Amino acid sequence: MSGKEASVYIVRCGETIRCAKVYKEATQRSFKKAVAYREGRKVRNSRRARAMEKGSGFGREQQEQAWQSAEVDALYKLAAAGVRVPVPYGCFDGVLLMELVTDEEGYVAPRLNDVEMSAEQAREDHLTMMGYVVKMLCEGIIHGDLSEFNVLVDENGPVIIDLPQAVDASANNNAEWMLARDVNNIREYYGQFAPELRDTEYAKEMWALYEKGELTPDTVLTGQFAEIETEADIATIMQEIDAARDEERFRKERQKEAKHGVDESKFNWSED
């Protein structure tokens, strides 16, 4: 299959059947706004970092390697954290070798968007997915492009795939809304089969706990979130604005005096 950032092949490794993901060059990828996803990613080698900033030929090459390694790093980290992702076996010359996720009969597992289910199954799988997103967030990772098209379903449930655009939750200014988009995409899909899921607010609940440092892999979520709404104290706000204006006016007067000097003869100086 060919996707927006890579083509995927079924390959034989000895007697084992695996999956090979061959990344496309930047000029051939249709993934939009990649810069927003790269924000906050750290490159240890300062020479590489400078080259990537300048956008030189070497820098673009390093940027491609960073794009590919982001998925490899995320797969290893998430697999260790208990998130169901394809088991990675390494990346070689732009080719990511990983587990082939199959169904009960050994065929390639279907994507979530091709699966019909009961309301009970939708609720169960949705809860599983929310648990995976929490574990990802606890590892500092946000998928960034999560939807029913980036989830496979095998006999044991959902498996999250496609992570080259994985976002650093603590360093990317777009992290909060990307998390919300991921979670809400999944909510809307499962909500087709269990409509009550569309009233949940898991993204807001997760992010609020994450910001306070209270989110753990074992956190039990409710799916409910109460927005804090308070009326603005207009009088206090206006007082602060007036105080700021007075301070600015005083600052300008002081600057003017310093620039033009002050006639000290106007003052009656005492020895004290």
Image (spheres, helix red, strand yellow):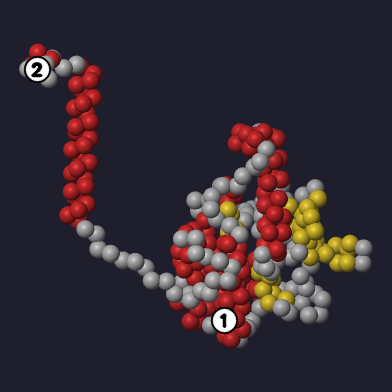
Q: Quadrant of residue 13?
A: bottom right
Instruction: Say whether residue 262 is visible.
Output: yes
Q: Quadrant of residue 216?
A: bottom right
Task: Left or right? Give the position of 240 relative to 69.
Answer: left
Q: For the point 21% across and 45% down, which residue is it? A: 241
Question: How far apart are labels 1 and 2 at the CA level?
Answer: 84 Å
Q: For the point 67% across and 52% down, which residue is it? A: 70
Task: Left or right? Give the position of 223 relative to 148.
Answer: left
Q: Which residue is the extreme one toward the front?
A: 272
In this rendering, the answer to whether 253 lies above or below 191 is above
Residue type at mark 2 is Ser
- From the viewer's side, name the closer residue of 8 and 215: 215
What residue sits right under mark 1 in the picture? 123
Picture quarter with the C terminus: top left
Look at the numbered disc 1 and give the secondary structure of its residue.
Answer: helix
Q: Which percent across, then down, holds residue 125?
A: 61, 78
Task: Left or right? Give the position of 152 relative to 141.
Answer: right
Query: Could you say which disc has been placed on residue 1 in the image?
Result: none
Q: Which percent across, then down, holds residue 226?
A: 38, 71
Crowding at mark 2 (Cα within 10 Å: few <14, some 14-19, many 20+): few
Task: Left or right? Give the position of 70 relative to 253.
Answer: right
What residue sits right under mark 2 in the picture? 270
Q: Which percent across, then down, holds residue 231?
A: 25, 63
Residue type at mark 1 is Arg
- From the viewer's side, name the closer residue of 228 and 52: 228
Crowding at mark 1 (Cα within 10 Å: few <14, some 14-19, many 20+): many
Q: Earlier in the sequence, mark 1 or mark 2?
A: 1
